[in-house]
Amino acid sequence: MAVPTHDPKKILRELVALPSVHPEADAMGTIPGEAAMAAWMADHLRSLGGAVTTALIAPGRPSVVGVFEPARKARATVVFAPHLDTVGVRGMTVPAFKLTESNGRLHGRGACDTKGPTAALLAAVGEWVRSAERRTSAVRWVVAATAGEEQGSLGAQALVKAGLRADFAVALEPTDLKVVYAAKGVLRVWITVPGRAAHGAKPERGDNAVYRALPLVQALQAELAPWLAAQRHPVLGGCSLNLGVLQGGGELNLVPAQCRIGLDIRVHPGCAAAEVRRRLAALIARHAPRAKLSLHREGPAFVTEKGGPWAKRLRGAGRGWAAADWFCDANIFAAHGTPAVAFGPGSIRQAHTKDEFIVERELRAGAAAFGQFMRGA
């Protein structure tokens, strides 16, 4: 492999050049999916001496697991979990799959989320495998690069269902090198409101599904959203509701036969998704009784103890503690019994943006932080 294993910028250049847009997103003419990224990752981890396996979540969509055994008998296992996929690239104002530089910023899809943190980690692993600390280590380090994180953490879910467990897990995300020890859960649903089509010149012969949906939309804003905001958690604050999709009709001269409402709800350990769904069902029964509620995605919140030895060790290499509104693979590991956090260089504000970037000095600071954590300094 031509890339120096200790140089995060050169590693990032190779990663950005590999399109790994997840299949649900717009890839703008490129091949979506994670297969090429997974192949690169497997080769790279093998070149560092890792024992590598892959696990498919779907054809052409492998997760990659590289295990680095210690010189001594392992007394602990720590998982680093970067994800292989990125969001789509439509509307980007910088080249999506070529790392470009401007004023200390490194641009490209995934440069921040999460190929930048991945490059920082791989640089640190490359240094660690050649270090004196490895000869005295009793820690089994695992790099579990997951497919499908942007689609509901599909790869992480498959790995934990297959039995992956550890003493600690670090999901790689751009957290400004703060240890995200708590994050909200997610509940995403579709509500389908039926109507009856008719010619737009004779609307009285139809049943306008958009009109049918409006009382429910208003109730969501006036009743459910304030109730969610009032459910407070000492770390994660209130819950939230976003009406992200409202689709009805297709032509000006047709009465809409269906209206779809898409909701993104963020919850915490003190506000169960089951209770939110119960309240949603009650609102539907009152305001749109013929509508159907269906689940799109549900994922748990988590809060990891800051006093745990591994969390404290990572905090010592980072820049403090943080909590997050967003969902990532750490939620999945925590829900299956592995204390987990999210951590990495870069700012979440730059994730998924039209000019996505990571600041080069932050990328290098991330490599140093991962290295410090692995060495236990």
Image (cartoon, rainbow, N blue to C red):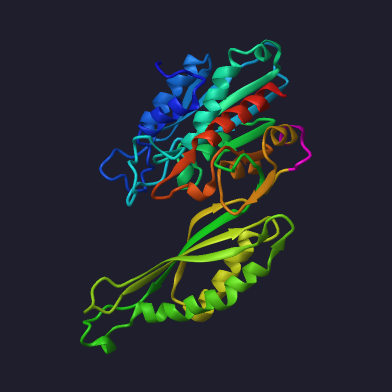
Quadrant (top left, top right, bottom left, bottom right) of the N terminus: top left
User: Could one spot residue 202 in this view of the protein?
Assistant: yes
Q: Going by the picture, which residue comes out furthest to the right? A: 307
Q: Is residue 283 left or right of residue 39?
A: right
Res 72 → quadrant: top right
Residue 346, compared with residue 285, is above or below; it is above
Image coordinates of residue 107 in percent, x first then y, are 41, 40
Q: Residue at x 36, y 29 (%)?
A: 36
Please tell me how many numbered marks the rendered image carries: 0
Residue 48, compared with residue 27, is above or below; it is above
Residue 253, compared with residue 74, is above or below; it is below
Quadrant (top left, top right, bottom left, bottom right) of the C terminus: top right
Res 173 → quadrant: top right
Res 84 → quadrant: top left
Q: Residue at x 43, y 25 (%)?
A: 10
Image coordinates of residue 270 in percent, x first then y, are 70, 59
User: Could one spot residue 82 in this view of the protein?
Assistant: no
Q: Give the magenta range.
A: 305-311
Q: Residue at x 45, y 22 (%)?
A: 42
Image coordinates of residue 153 in percent, x first then y, are 51, 43
Image coordinates of residue 50 in percent, x first then y, are 53, 17
Of residue 100 and residue 345, the one placed in the foreground of this image is 100
Residue 308 included in the magenta stretch of the image: yes
Q: Going by the picture, which residue comes out furthest to the front? A: 103
Residue 228 included in the magenta stretch of the image: no
Q: Is residue 88 left or right of residue 348?
A: left
Of residue 239 and residue 260, the one placed in the foreground of this image is 239
Q: Is residue 162 left or right of residue 319?
A: left
Residue 169, compared with residue 257, is above or below; it is above
